[in-house]
């Protein structure tokens, strides 16, 4: 009887093991997908399950680098900016550079470590430096992905380490690859880095096609057990330019062979004539830090609103005095006693419905409004309207890449923003454009307004004025140094750009 019981228990255990392992294996099987596009014309040359949800693995770092390049051009980062390794980032699993908490590396070395070594610890440290936390940075990545037309992509971390909610498609990765090439040609060249030497160790790029397939100029590999072996490649050969994606390879050799086969066929069909227009988006809409948050909100965001940047809270009450704060990457945050000024004769006043204000209580706010507006919500226009000359959009979900808008020249990045070297005005008037929970949020809106104003705000200092309202610490975003006439004239110009503002005078 004992032997029979033991046998029955063994059979039961075996059946249970098979029942558990079968669905797990099926679930873990990598999803295969591939797609190729003629980057000269936008035509899709190959598509197999291009809209199937897949795990991006380290292809995620392409978006991490997009965000980094964007901040470099906005003046918030440079190649020499130091990134400190945090304990959380240092604990990331391999592949990694194995920096200890507190150790630093430059942004340029961080970029090369992501391109070649695909270092997860460096990706996490870069994310924390930019977004405050990797989770917040991932939210910014997803929000920016939506603005780039990557509508099927969700990011949960900056490295691509396993996360069941982090997904993308071959089509979205093609969009991202083209955006990287169109928006940052000078930085994109780093994707062709074959070797990276750091602290005496030499790391070879995981992308073997850089060495073995003529014309390859990048861009990224990726692998996790759930994703399989992924690769995004860009090839320029004999006047032709093809970008392709492969998801779910069984091994790096199988993946590379499949990519070569797709590229070979695509290059025979690709055109030498460049007709595709770069699909540009407003750099001003990109986050330089955690995106502005409402000082107060009555109800949680609906699912459709989760990836939309929230509007500013326009402050209608003068701030109280608070200690002076300083940030290394922006002008000093000054504290000033100010009082609101009445609107000049003829200006239109518009009373907004009562809502929660800075202190969490209902209040009626009065702000400038243009005399005539369209049916569009003014705040929505302020958040999403690109600056003059910018284009917006992304690859459409159709089988061809639409040529969106007309081509426009992008300004070349400056080592230092022009406004940093401008002579400072010293008048007694200020212009306020909003109030935010974090100083970085206020800085973002001020940089946004400065860029959109086309030089109008260059002579004036940007300040974030801290004020304590109940239990909340808020930062009011202002420009100071105006004379009276210039203040009202500038505020009127900002309103024409759909940027809310009002004028105050320092006491």
Image: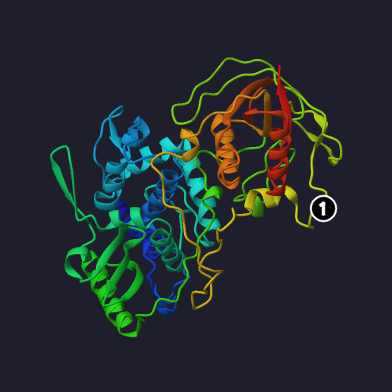
Question: From this viewpoint, which residue is outermost toward the bottom?
Answer: 269
* Label 1: how many Cα within 10 Å (few below 14, some 14–19, many 20+): few
- Residue situated in front as seen by the camera: 149 or 155: 149
Give above or below for 400 relative to 24.
below
On screen, residue 245 versus residue 164, left or right, reads left
Residue 38, located in which quarter of the rendered image?
Answer: bottom left
Residue beneath label 1, please?
Answer: 372
On screen, residue 105 versus residue 194, left or right, reads right
Point out residue 488 in the picture as x, y percentages from the top left corner. 73, 35
Give above or below for 429 relative to 54.
above
On screen, residue 377 versus residue 14, left or right, reads right
Point out residue 223 in the picture as x, y percentages from the top left corner. 31, 57
Q: Residue at x 23, y 73 (%)?
A: 257
Q: Which residue is drawn at 60% across and 24% down?
A: 426
Q: Residue at x 27, y 69 (%)?
A: 255
Q: SS class of the residue under badge 1?
A: loop
Point out residue 313 in the picture as x, y percentages from the top left corner. 70, 36
What quarter of the picture does the N terminus occupy? bottom left
Question: From this viewpoint, which residue is outermost toward the left?
Answer: 200
On screen, residue 59 versus residue 368, left or right, reads left
- Residue situated in front as seen by the camera: 82 or 52: 82
Give above or below for 253 relative to 202.
below
Point out residue 199 in the picture as x, y percentages from the top left corner. 16, 37
Residue 441, located in which quarter of the rendered image?
Answer: top right
Way the structure is coloured: rainbow
Q: Is residue 13 visible?
A: no
């Amino acid at each position: 009887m004992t032997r029979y019981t033991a046998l029955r228990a063994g059979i039961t255990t075996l059946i249970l093991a098979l029942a558990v392992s079968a669905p797990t294996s099926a679930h873990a099987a990598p999803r295969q997908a591939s797609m190729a596009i003629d980057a000269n014309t936008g035509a899709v040359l190959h598509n197999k399950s291009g809209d199937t949800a897949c795990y991006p693995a380290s292809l995620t770092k392409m978006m991490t680098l997009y965000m980094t390049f964007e901040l470099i051009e906005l003046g918030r980062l440079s190649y020499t900016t130091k990134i400190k390794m945090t304990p959380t980032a240092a604990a990331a699993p391999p592949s990694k550079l194995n920096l200890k908490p507190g150790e630093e590396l430059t942004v340029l070395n961080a970029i090369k470590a992501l391109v070649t070594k695909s270092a997860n610890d460096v990706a996490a440290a870069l994310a924390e430096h930019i977004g405050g936390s990797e989770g917040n940075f991932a939210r910014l990545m997803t929000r920016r992905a939506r603005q780039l037309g990557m509508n099927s992509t969700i990011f949960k971390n900056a490295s691509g380490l396993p996360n069941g909610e982090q997904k993308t498609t071959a089509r979205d990765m093609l969009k991202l690859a083209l955006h990287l090439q169109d928006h940052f040609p000078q930085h994109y060249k780093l994707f062709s880095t074959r070797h990276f030497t750091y602290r005496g160790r030499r790391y070879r790029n995981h992308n073997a096609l850089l060495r073995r397939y003529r014309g390859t100029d990048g861009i990224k590999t990726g692998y996790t057990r759930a994703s399989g072996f992924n690769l995004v490649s860009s090839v320029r050969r004999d006047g032709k330019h093809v970008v392709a994606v492969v998801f779910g390879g069984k091994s790096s050799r199988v993946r590379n062979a499949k990519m070569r086969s797709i590229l070979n066929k695509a290059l025979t069909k690709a055109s030498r004539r460049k007709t595709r227009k770069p699909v540009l988006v407003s750099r001003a809409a990109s986050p330089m830090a955690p995106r502005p948050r409402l000082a107060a909100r009555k109800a949680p965001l609906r699912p459709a609103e989760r990836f939309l940047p929230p509007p500013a809270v326009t402050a209608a009450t003068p701030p109280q005095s608070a200690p002076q704060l300083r940030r290394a990457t922006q002008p000093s945050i000054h504290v000033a006693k100010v009082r609101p000024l009445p609107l000049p004769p003829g200006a239109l006043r518009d009373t907004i419905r009562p809502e929660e204000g800075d202190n969490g209580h209902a209040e009626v706010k009065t702000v400038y409004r243009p005399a005539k507006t369209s049916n569009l919500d003014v705040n929505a226009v302020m958040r999403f309207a690109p600056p003059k000359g910018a284009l917006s959009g992304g690859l459409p979900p159709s089988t061809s890449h639409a040529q969106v808008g007309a081509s426009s020249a992008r300004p070349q990045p400056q080592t230092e923003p022009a406004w940093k070297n401008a002579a400072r005005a010293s008048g007694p008037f200020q212009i306020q454009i909003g109030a935010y929970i974090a100083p970085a949020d206020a800085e973002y809106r001020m940089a946004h307004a400065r860029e959109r104003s086309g030089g109008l705000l260059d002579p004036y200092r940007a300040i974030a004025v801290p004020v304590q309202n109940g239990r909340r610490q808020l930062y009011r975003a202002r420009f100071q140094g105006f004379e009276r006439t210039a203040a009202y004239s500038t505020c009127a110009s900002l309103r024409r750009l759909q940027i809310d503002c009002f004028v105050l005078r320092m006491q």
